[in-house]
Image: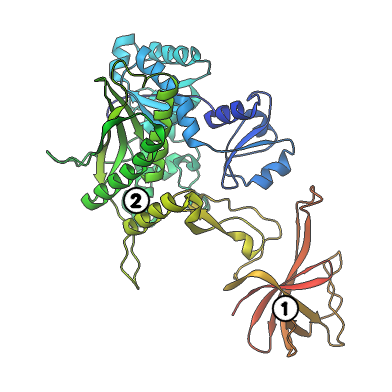
Amino acid sequence: MSGRVVACWIPDWPVVVAAAAIGAAVDQDAVAVVRRDEVVACSAPARVAGVRRRMRLRTALARCPGLRVSERDLEGEVRAFEPVVRHVEQSVMPRLEVIRPGLIVAPARGPVRYWRGEAALVERLVDAVAEQGYPARCGIAATVFAAALAARAGRIVPAGEDAAWLAPFPVGVLGLVRHTDLLQRLGIATVGQFAALPADKVAARLGPDGQMAHRSAQGLEARPLSVRSAGADYSVARDFDPPEERLEPLGFTARSMAEDLHQRLVAAGVVCARVEVGVELADGRTLCRLFRHEGRLSPLAVADRIRGVLTAWHEDGTLTPRGEGGIIRLILRPEQLSPATGRQDALVGERLTPADVERAASRLQALLGHQAVTQLALGGGRGPADRVRRVPYGDVAAAQLPQGPWPGQLPAPHPAHVFPARRTAVLTDAEGRPVAVSARLALSAPPAVLSVDGRAEAVEVTGWAGPWPVWEHWWDRDLAQRLARLQVTTASGRAWLLAVERERWWAEALYG
């Protein structure tokens, strides 16, 4: 997308959809939309109470006990947003892209000429969305990234001033979740400071994601120019004979097509910035919708968007036949291709590429369910078992999981082996009496002997560190937990992580 870009944003769209589903009022009730125990969006009353995006659910509930929680439904958000998109498409500008439900962008040149000015275009967009019953903010800038931020501010950025306008924003808006803390520790707190860094140093330290963020910070499009050669076509299509009218088979087909598209792009060494979904109907009509993806193109994300838009077209009567009914062809067309940066394969063992892993995981999820294939991800938590969680493959990346702060968090180094279930332990002093921990975190006596799992051969304690207190869910009688952790080394050469709760000792992990 070159030239000026116009963006239209409906604030808190996931909350709008979730509130309608649970019967809440967005402007009055504290509502949070969560995904895998992480807040992805919240209403204004929830933000006033201290709830923030990327916050763990239990922390959000602690800050706002009356919070109404809803699991995110991306397909439902796409379905609810489609009528707004179609109205804008028909009444304001015919060619637009859906970045995500609640945010659309389009080249500004044609609509600006038609509506006779950028200010007039912005005003018409706001009015068009208001006609659908939603408040909107619009902005215009030189890139998709800058236009999206301009829409949040309701600002038209003067031509040529994008980099200067972006400069004061905090570096966190660039989306470098894994590297934001590092940049801040280095004294790089704003987009302008990040843009001033040498491009080669950014690429070497932060990789492809850092390269794209650096271009965005400089007021350039994140991806380089298209590399599609003449005649190269990576589109994926499925024909239906007889025409298909049921949504369920179309949903399964969409997932398979998204996987095939991904494989074609990987084989060609390219990635795409957006995907066009085309539907050919038996009555001769053709429907299209253009989606620009955020981050990595995942088959699951593409399939969710296809199912959402098909359901919306079905519900609003767009798919109602004007003659012979049904869909005869479904097409996925990748656009704005750029070179794939690739990811590191395993250095040892069987040579499986990331594409092989993703393909196998996607097939298993299709057979056994989305929750059947998981990956381990490090997140926030006080104990070692709390920091590791299973995330369904293709969902929230490990870098996006909450990192703290966690008062009472176990300090490094972290244990090498965490037991699936705590083991019983006995910790005594030199006189054979059980060691206790007072409310002031004082040991009743120096630890001398440790026995784990009731073994007769107790081992001598040669050193210890701690204790560290943990007090969780203090506001909930059923979930409240109060304990203290202690690290001990023994004469056998092993180091243990122990926890005492209600005067009982447990072994949680082993260091060596």
In the image, residue 7 above or below residue 50? above
Q: Residue at x 50, y 14 (%)?
A: 130
Q: What element does badge 2 sit on?
A: helix
In the image, residue 334 above or below residue 3? below
Residue 333 percent across, percent down from the top left:
26, 36
In the image, residue 276 above or below residue 378? above
Displayed quadrant of residue 452: bottom right
Q: Residue at x 41, y 22 (%)?
A: 85
Amino acid on which the number 1 mark rests in the picture:
Trp
Q: Which residue is mark 1?
A: 464
Amino acid on which the number 2 mark rests in the picture:
Pro
Residue 420 percent across, percent down from the top left:
62, 68
Q: Which residue is mark 2?
A: 208
Q: Residues within 10 Å of mark 2 (few under 14, many from 20)?
A: some
Q: Residue at x 32, y 20 (%)?
A: 108
In three-dimensional space, the C-alpha distance between marks 1 and 2, rounded to whole angstroms, equals: 44 Å
Residue 1 percent across, percent down from the top left:
28, 30
Q: What element does badge 1 sit on?
A: strand
Residue 472 percent across, percent down from the top left:
75, 54
Q: Left or right of 503: which side holds 344?
A: left
